[in-house]
Amino acid sequence: MDKLITIVPPSEVTAEYKTEAKTWTKWDSKSRKKFSYNYTATEQVLILDGSAELTPDDGSPAAVIGKGDQVTFHKGYKCKWKITKRMKKHYTVLQDYADDVGDEDDNEGDAPPAITCDVCDVDCFAESYFLEDGEEDICPKCYEKDGKYAGAEHQKEGVKWIEPKPKKKKGPPKKKQKIAKEQ
């Protein structure tokens, strides 16, 4: 599995890579601590903050990634993530050349699904709004700009997304008001 993950330490990450990464989708582990992931396409990552231990499913030694690392997860890498410090990263999913042209056994390829905004033509696979009537996909920017998409289904990576309910903040206890007695 070592050939399916490439880790470049922060001191060797180029300025060009860092600049390009700023244009990619941002991900935040938030409350996610452990999960399994199967990379069906090559993914490039720049870790902005945090750390994780990745244990390959094939029993290979675990890899540790952290702040500043440039990581490439090659197609076929399967692992269990253990977030050791809340992680934030920029990432992009690359379509492999074989997927573009198909290979001898399969002319369709194994590319991840593509979702493009039907208004502005931007890639919105990471997050979109789907209108069943007319089968339109709308990026978040166009969705917020134009109020005519009421009833659209919010999706992330092509799957219906339901925002978690915000946790109620516990404030300081309310003080009881003293009522002045009339004399």
Image (spheres, rainbow, N blue to C red):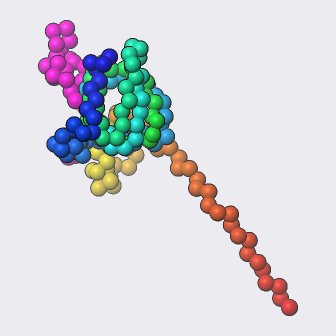
The image quarter containing residue 97 is top left
Q: Is residue 97 visible?
A: yes
Is 56 rendered above or below residue 137?
A: above
**Start-end of magenta stretch:** 94-123
Most foreground residue, 115 or 91: 91
Q: Is residue 154 magenta?
A: no
Residue sitting farthest toward the left: 101
Query: Is residue 146 toward the left or the right of residue 29 in the image?
Result: left
Quadrant housing residue 87: top left
Is residue 137 among the parts visible in the rendering?
A: no
In this rendered view, identify the residue nearer to me: 152 or 29.
Answer: 29
Q: Is residue 63 above or below residue 13?
A: above
Magenta stretch, main secondary structure, is loop
Q: Position of residue 149 (x, y in %)?
A: 34, 49
x and y, in percent, of residue 52 in the image? 41, 33
Quick one: which residue is furthest to the front in this view?
11
